[in-house]
Image (cartoon, helix red, strand yellow):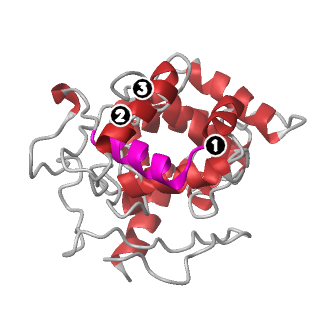
Amino acid sequence: MSRSAFAIGLSIALSGLVSTALYAQEPASAGTPAETARLEYEQVMTLTPDLENGRRVYLTCAVCHRPEGWGAPDGTYPQIAGQLRTVIIKQLADIRARNRDNPLMYPFSVPRILGGPQNVADVAAYVAQLPMTPENGVGPGMDLPLGKEVYVEHCTKCHGENGEGNEDEHIPAIAGQHYLYLMRQFDAIRMGRRKNSDPKMVKQIDSFTPLQQAAVLDYTSRLRPPESKLAETGWVNPDFPAYVRDPMGVPPMPPMPAGLMEPPAYPSVPPAR
């Protein structure tokens, strides 16, 4: 059995191998995916997180996001360590309700695999307290003055002067995020592929030139989170002492969880190593 397959199997076991019990915890069917996601978000926010259970649930996520939650500099997976708890809950609820299309992540987010609202609350709290990588992927650094100008004019009001986000409004922290992931999501938002995007942002970035986009996201990737949120160089998550990391440090493509009807759409070409 491959390491990735074993990790998925173990994560399912840790989650409880349940079916109807977890589905019963899903929010009642609503008129739209956005409403379904909103109901689950509100339900999760009433729950008290259990970090120890969050650690167990996170094994499902670690296959792609890695035990440290640092994702991949090539943009295949985002850094989620240190992200605001409300943002993690919001995005999970949106993906589970199909209010955000993410074919690769969706099968691993459904209640049968990840668990119900309590597990969402627990894993979000666990991820939010993970220290962030001090060496995230950045851009070429060629137009940083332009990037700063665009960021100050268009981004600070929502994402904050230092990219810290807004927990009350579940606006993502973007400081320290991988440049290529930011580029990919920016394109998805502008082209309408990310359905849960803030309409104000969609309208605001519509007129950005390719140069402005590359510059502002390069600048954003270089914004530093507070030192208290950064891991020391070489840090590995002690909660996963037996996790075998790939020698090249590249996250694997996860296997399909057994029994799901809709397989994720895998890229035809592997990410650059």
Q: Is residue 47 magenta?
A: no
Q: Is residue 220 magenta?
A: yes
| Side of 80 where 240 appears, left or right | left
Q: Nearer the viewer, residue 40 or 94?
A: 94
| Side of 251 where 131 appears, left or right | left
Q: Nearer the viewer, residue 106 or 3?
A: 106
Point out the image quarter for the N terminus. bottom left
Give, as a single range, the part of the protein colored magenta: 206-222
Residue at the (31%, 55%) spot, across then down: 139
Identity, as a three-letter code, of the amino acid under mark 2 = Lys
> Callout 1: few (<14), some (14-19), or many (20+) C-alpha neighbours within 10 Å?
few
Are the residues flagged by discs 3 and 2 in contact, CB closer than 8 Å? yes
User: x%, y% of residue 214?
Assistant: 43, 52
Real-space Cα distance between discs 1 and 2? 17 Å
Q: Please tell me whether residue 9 is drawn above or below residue 91 in the rendered image.
A: below
User: What label sits on residue 207 in the rendered view?
Assistant: 1
* Kind of element beneath mark 2: helix
Q: Report the magenta stretch's main SS.
A: helix
> Callout 2: few (<14), some (14-19), or many (20+) C-alpha neighbours within 10 Å?
some
Residue labelled with disc 2: 148
Say whether disc 1 or disc 2 marks the residue closer to the N-terminus: 2
| Side of 145 where 121 appears, left or right | right
Residue at the (39%, 47%) spot, across then down: 215
Identity, as a three-letter code, of the amino acid under mark 3 = Val
Real-space Cα distance between discs 3 and 1? 16 Å
